[in-house]
Amino acid sequence: MAAAWMSVLVVMAVVNAAEGGDDRRPCASVHASSSVVTVGSPVTVTCVVDDDCPALAGHQVQLRLGDRVLPGVIPVANGSARAYRLLIPAFNHSRATLTCCLRDAPSHIIAGLEIQAGYPPPALRNLSCQANLSAHESLTCKWEASLPDSHLPTKYTLHTHIGDLKWSHAYELPPGVRSYTIPRAGFVFFSEMEIYVKGVNALGETSSARLALEPVSSAKFDPPKIVKLQAWRPGCLRLKWEFSQFQDWMRDFVSLEVRLKTESSGSWTERPILDRAMPQRYVYQCGLLHGTRYVAQIRVRYQQSPWSEWSGGRPAFTLETAPTGALHTWMRVTGHLLHNQLQMLLFWKPSARFRANGRNLSYVVSALRTLNKRGKLCATAGSHCTFHVPRKARKVYLVALNAAGRSSPTSVPIYRPIAGETIPEVRAAAAGNGSVLVRWEDVPSPALIDYIVEWRPLLNNDLSLVRFETARRNLSTLIVTGPLEPYKPYGISVYPRFKEGIGPPRTVHAYSLQKAPSEVPKIRIKKNWQYHVELSWDEIPLDRRNGIIQSYKLFYWDETRRVHVATGDPQERKVVLTGLNSWSVYDAVLMVSTYGGSRNGSMVHFDIKEMDPVSSVIIVLATCAFLCLLIIFLVKTCSSEHNRLKVRFWPDVPDPANSSIKSWTSESTQDIRSSWDFEEPNPIYLSHLSFLELPRKPGKEEDVTAWLNNAEDTSDLGESICGSPFLPGLASSNGDSVPYATVIFPAPHPHEYLRSESTQPLLGSEESPKCYQNVDASEGSQCFFGPCRPEEEDNAAAAIQWEDFPFLRALAMNDTQ
Ligand SMILES: *[C@@H]1O[C@H](CO)[C@@H](O)[C@H](O)[C@H]1NC(C)=O
Ligand SMILES: *[C@@H]1O[C@H](CO)[C@@H](O)[C@H](O)[C@H]1NC(C)=O
Ligand SMILES: *[C@@H]1O[C@H](CO)[C@@H](O)[C@H](O)[C@H]1NC(C)=O
Ligand SMILES: *[C@@H]1O[C@H](CO)[C@@H](O)[C@H](O)[C@H]1NC(C)=O
Ligand SMILES: *[C@@H]1O[C@H](CO)[C@@H](O)[C@H](O)[C@H]1NC(C)=O
Ligand SMILES: *[C@@H]1O[C@H](CO)[C@@H](O)[C@H](O)[C@H]1NC(C)=O
Ligand SMILES: *[C@@H]1O[C@H](CO)[C@@H](O)[C@H](O)[C@H]1NC(C)=O
Ligand SMILES: *[C@@H]1O[C@H](CO)[C@@H](O)[C@H](O)[C@H]1NC(C)=O
C-alpha cells in the first residue's frame, strides 16, 4: 500500500518535471546497481538530477529508503546533470522503495525505485516417485525444498524424459507445491524414465538430482490374495496366490514373502523370500509343526519397489503325526484304599521338546508299557488324573495320543510318602509381574533326588489349576511364574523327593501382589476384669484378605482425643486394654494391615462405667456366703429347738411322708443327708432289717416269740422286705398295730432296734421300696443300702438316742442276748 502510494507520488513528480522541461525526459531519475538483490548484499544507488529543469535548479537532494534518510550521499559529475551516489552496504529488506527528494522540501519526491531482495531458488532434494497401480493409475513424485525460502517469485517445473520414446515433458507446478502426480498418459509402466524438478527466479535457478526409474518397480502393489492354503506332505503347507484385481495384468516374476503364525505362539514368523513367484502358482512352506493350525499372510514387490501391505490371513492345518517328546510328570499318593490299593494323583505338562503333532490331544495312564485296555488306569484330555494302583506297583506309564498315533510312553515311578526329613523352612515373596520367588532350606540328605514345587490357588479347588516345577537338588530357590493372579492367595508346597519316597511337604501361602484387605472384622468387646477391656475379632475370610495379615492395630481415644495404639496378635486376634478411666467413654478403630496396605474399620464406643465385674462378683460372693452362714445357723438352732418342743407338746404321730424307709427308696437319700441330720439313723449304716408286729396288748413273752419267729427269716433283708406279701399281717393296713423294724449292724455289734415312725405297713404299699441287692457280696459284708464303711464310723452312727424309742428300749432291756 505504501509502495503504491509512493509510486503515485513519483509519477506526479516525473509529470511535473516533464511539463517544466523542453522535451519529455524526466527531470530526475533513480538508478540502482540491481533492482533485485540477494538479501544482505551491497547495493549502489544513484539519483540523477537534470539541472535543466528549472524547478530543481539549485536544490540539494537527499535519498531515502522507505521513511529513513540515507546518509553518505556523494555528488558526482555526470555531464550536464548532477548525480548523487550512495552505497547501501547490506540490503536487508525483502522489498523497499528508494526515493530521491529535495532536501529543503522532503515531502517533494522527484524520483523513486523499488528494490527487492531475496535468494536464489532453494535446493530441491529427495525427489522420489511412486506409481499407484490402483484404480486410477498414476505416478506421484515428491520432493523437498531447502530453507530459506527465496522470497522472490519462483517458477517450478517437473521435467520428465522417457529415453525409449525420446519424449520429454515439463509440467508447470503451482507455487509452493512439493508434490505432483503425473497422469497415466505421462509415463509407461515398463519404460525407464528420467525425472527432475527445476526452480527459476530473478537471482538464479536450481534443479534437483535426476531420478531414473521404471514406474512399475516404483509401485507399491495392493495387498495380494491367498487363494488356497492347504496341508501338503507332513510338516508342509502349500499356498496359491494372486494379485489384487487392479494388478492382475502383471505377469512378471515378483518377490513374495510369506509369514506364518501358530495359534499358540501368537507372533509371526517370516519365511525366506521367494524371488521368482508368479501368481496362480503354488508356493511351498515346509519345516512346520505337525497337526498344527497355521495362519499365513503374504506380500509382494517388484524388483526394488516397496513391499505391498500384508495380505489377509488364511488358516490351515498341517498333517497330523503321532505326538513326540517327553512329558514332565509329578505324582503323589493321595490315599490308601481297601484291598491294598493306593490312590494316586498324577500331574503332567509338556517338556520344551514335546510336540502334540495333532489337534485333539488326549492322555492315557496305563499300568502296562504297551497300551491296551487291561492296563488302562485313566484317560483324559486334561493334564492330571486320579487312579488306583496296587500297593506293590512300582511304575505307571503316561502316553499322549492324537488321531495319528501315540507317543512313546513316559515312565512314571511311584514314590510313596515317607516320614523322612522335612524341609526346615519355605518362604515365598512376590517377585513382580505376577511371579513369586520361593526359597527353601536344603535338606542335607544324600538320598535326596530333587524338590517338587507345587502351587495352586487357594480359593479354587480345581485340580486343573495345580502347577508344578521340579528343582534340582542343588537348588533352593525357584521363581513361580503363573502369572499368579494379584490379591489372590496361593498355596505353594515344596516336597523333597528321596530315593525311597517323597518326604512330607512344607506349604506356605503366597500372594503375587497384595493390597489392603477388603473388609475389617467387627470388634467384640468383653469387659472382663477391673479396668481392663478385652477387644477381640474374627479372622477375615480368605477371599477378602487380599494379602498376608501383617498386623492388627487398635487406635483408641477418650474425650481428650489423645490416640493410643494397641497392637493385636495376628494369631490370637485380640487386645487387652489396661489403664482405662472408668469415667471416660472410649472410641476405637481397628486397622488391619497386609503387606500391601491397610484399612480402618468402623468406630466402636465402649466404657468401663457401671461394670467393674470383679467388684460385683466379690460383693455377690460375700453376700451369698453371709446368707448361707445365716441360714445354716438358723436351721441348726430351729431344728434342735423344734425337737425339744415337739417331744414336749405333741405325741409321737408317725408321719408316713417322713418315713425313713420311704425316703430310703430314693437313691439320692445317701447324698442329701447332711451331717446335722441326726434324728434319723443313717441308713447307710444299716446292714440288716426285719419287721415284727406287736399285738395291741403285748405280753413280754409273746413279744419275744413273735420277734424270734420273724427274726428267723432275716438272713437276707431283700428277701424279707420283698417277701412282705407273704406276711399278711404286714400287708394289711392296720392303725392298731405298731410295726417295728429290726436293724442289724455289722458284727460284732449286738442287734439293735429302730422304730419306724410310720404306722403304715410300708411293705405292702404301692410305693414300697425296690429290692436292694447285695451289691458288695464279694466282700462278704452285708451292706444293702450303700457302700460299706469302715467300722469306726459305724460306732458313731450306732449312737442311737434311746429315749426316742421307748418300746425299743423296753425290748432292749429284754434282749435275748
Ligand atoms: C550520467 O547520467 C546518465 C543519465 O542521465 C546515465 O545514463 C549515466 O550512466 C550517468 N553517468 C555517470 C558516470 O553517472
Ligand atoms: C537492516 O540493517 C540495519 C542496519 O544494518 C538494521 O538497523 C535493520 O534493523 C535491518 N533490518 C532488517 C529487516 O533486518
Ligand atoms: C532428504 O535427503 C537428505 C540428504 O540429501 C537426507 O539427509 C534426508 O534424510 C532426506 N529426507 C527424507 C525425508 O528422505
Ligand atoms: C493409490 O490411489 C488410490 C486412489 O486412487 C488410493 O486410495 C491409494 O491409497 C493409492 N495407493 C498408494 C500406494 O498410494
Ligand atoms: C477329539 O476327540 C474326542 C474323543 O477322543 C472326540 O469326541 C472329538 O470329536 C475329537 N475332536 C476333534 C476335533 O477331532
Ligand atoms: C514386567 O514385565 C514387563 C514386560 O513384560 C517388563 O518390561 C518389566 O521389566 C517386568 N517387570 C519386572 C519387575 O520384572
Ligand atoms: C546344579 O547342578 C548342575 C549339574 O548337576 C549344575 O549344572 C548347576 O550349575 C548346579 N547349580 C548350582 C546353583 O550349583
Ligand atoms: C486409621 O485410623 C488411624 C487413627 O485415626 C490413622 O492414624 C490411620 O492412618 C488410619 N489408617 C488408614 C489406612 O486410614
Image: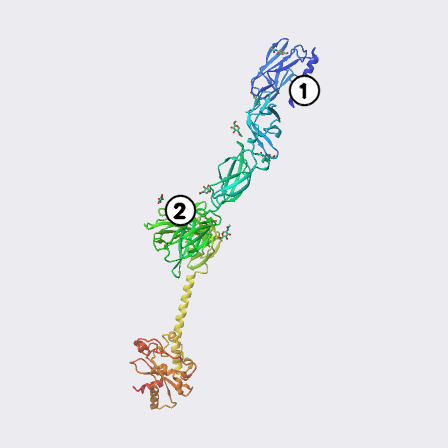
Q: Position of residue 167 (x, y in %)?
A: 60, 24
Q: How many marks?
A: 2
Does residue 146 appear anywhere in the picture? no
Along the line of sight, the residue nearer the viewer: 758 or 22 = 22
> What residue does disc 1 label?
8
Q: Return the mark for residue 52.
A: none
Image quadrant where one finds the N terminus: top right
- Label ID, residue 478: 2
Label 1 element class: helix
Q: For this view, does 182 lie left or right of residue 797?
A: right
Q: Using the image, determine if residue 651 lies above or below residue 54.
A: below
Q: Residues within 10 Å of mark 1 (few under 14, many from 20)?
A: few
The amino acid type of the residue labelled 1 equals Val
| Residue 792 coordinates in the image, percent (x, y) | 30, 76
* Residue at (30, 87) in percent of width and height: 816
Residue 353, x across and y down, in percent? 42, 45
Left-right relation of 579 to 58: left
Instruction: Measuring from the top left, give residue 315's x and y in whole percent.
Output: 53, 44
The amino acid marked with disc number 2 is Leu
Check disc 2: other Cα within 10 Å, few if <14, some if 14-19, many if 20+. some
Can see residue 713? Answer: yes
Ligand 6 quarter of the rendering: top left
Tell which tag, 1 or 2, sits nearer the viewer. Answer: 2
Residue lying at the far top of the rendered structure = 79
Circle 2 SS class:
strand
- Please name whichever residue, 184 or 29, is drawn nearer the observer in this view of the structure: 184
285 and 523: which one is in front? 285
Question: Residue drawn at (61%, 13%), measured in percent from left and top?
Answer: 84
